[in-house]
Amino acid sequence: MQPKRLTLLGSTGSVGEQSLSVAEAFPERYRVVALAAGRRIEKLAEQVRRFRPEFVSVAEAAGARELRERLGPDAPEIATGDAGLDAAAAHPADLVVSGLVGAVGLAPTLTAIRAGRDVALANKEVLVTAGALVLREVRAHGVTLLPVDSEHSAIFQCLAGQRLEDVAKLILTASGGPFRTWDPGRIARATVKEALNHPNWDMGPKITIDSATLMNKGLEVIEARWLFDLGPERVEVVVHPQSIVHSLVEFVDGSVLAQLGLPDMRVPIAVALAHPERLPLELPRLDLAALGQLDFEAPDTKRFPCLELAFAALRADEAAPAVLNAANEVSVAAFLDGRLAFPEIAAANAAVLDAHARKVGATALRDLDDVAEADRWARAQANEWLAGAGGVAS
Ligand code: MG
């Protein structure tokens, strides 16, 4: 058996590192051929020594120089900037792990798709900001998108061997975040520190705030709509505080399939890397008897209006999810800076989405320029809202 050739976009990030640790445990199955990272040169140098890729890309020329110095005569081909990222995405490989964080991941992910590579997708922004566009390219090039997010991996696993027309609905689980049991008055006064205190997953500050507002689940609803090509009326969310059931699929006969496991990102990463096989991971196993019970409740969209905004964006037009995402990045940054109260994150997002609905003009996403324009417009609107709301908008 030939090893699967892997390219990692965002190799020094959390998904990149965990993907490499999974690949490293099965050296006969994987060969890492290309790595793309930003500015963590020391970590990247260590990865290059461990995995000996053919091609490496970094953000800046200074980083490339440092990497060459660190690696000496053993350095592989090193490229820089957007062109380097693109070249890494197009480098001959069997699977590209799209693990960059933020908007920077969109263009190289499209490049990988257009080069005919299957993509293990961890970058949220790709489908949230450009789902309609990405779906058209995936179809045109006949590639497979393998989800890395735990919820989407669960749905992907439940759908294996099933027909899409037999699906009644996708049910995404949400932990409910740190304010799940809080009353509205207490949520209104929530501090940054309280919002950053996530019960089950250890993640970066932006996504942790998104978990507290349930915007993260909203963004995952948007991803699911494009990943599985089902309308928003067939996507639902249920709160499940233990994060053991990672998501479920209900079929037309009323059967519901679920995927369960301890919360560990290495499992969905391994599912994506090994598809259609599975890897014998040595991780702690789920002990249902020890767990005793699993709880579920409906999400409260009054206390957490961001979730409903995601459904509204999907019902609106192709550009609306990109608008919502950009507005949310601005409002979450303002909350983290102490410029906005917690409930105002949702208020700012709603105001920008409303303004988008009233705006006349193109709402389809024909290319990356349309995505960038929706993003730029929404950021300007959000900053205007912040200034008007009495916040000190920068
Ligand atoms: Mg998730």
Image (cartoon, helix red, strand yellow):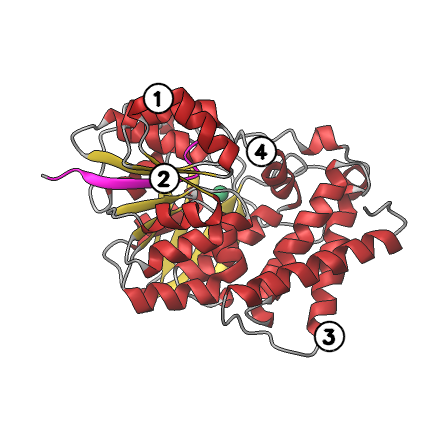
Q: Residues within 10 Å of mark 1 (few under 14, many from 20)?
A: few
Task: Pick the residue in front: 170 or 88.
Answer: 88
Q: Earlier in the sequence, mark 1 or mark 2?
A: 2
* Mark in front: 1 vs 2: 1
For the residue pair 191 and 360, the one nearer the viewer reads as 360
**Alpha-carbon neighbours of circle 2 within 10 Å: few (<14), some, or many (≥20)?**
many
Mark 1 → mark 4, Cα distance in angstroms: 33 Å
Which comes before the other along the chain, label 3 or label 4? 4
Confirm or reject: label 2 Cβ below 8 Å from ligand 1. no
Q: Amino acid at mark 4?
A: Gly
Point out which mark residue 358 bears: 3
Q: Which residues are magenta?
A: 2-12
Q: Are marks 3 and 4 in contact (CB under 8 Å)?
A: no
Identify the residue under disc 2.
8
Residue beneath the point at 28% across and 40% down = 6
Q: Secondary structure at mark 4?
A: loop
Badge 4 residue CB within 8 Å of ligand 1: no
Secondary structure of the residue carrying tag 3 is helix
How far across and how far down the image is residue 233, in percent? 50, 67
Q: Quadrant of residue 183?
A: top right
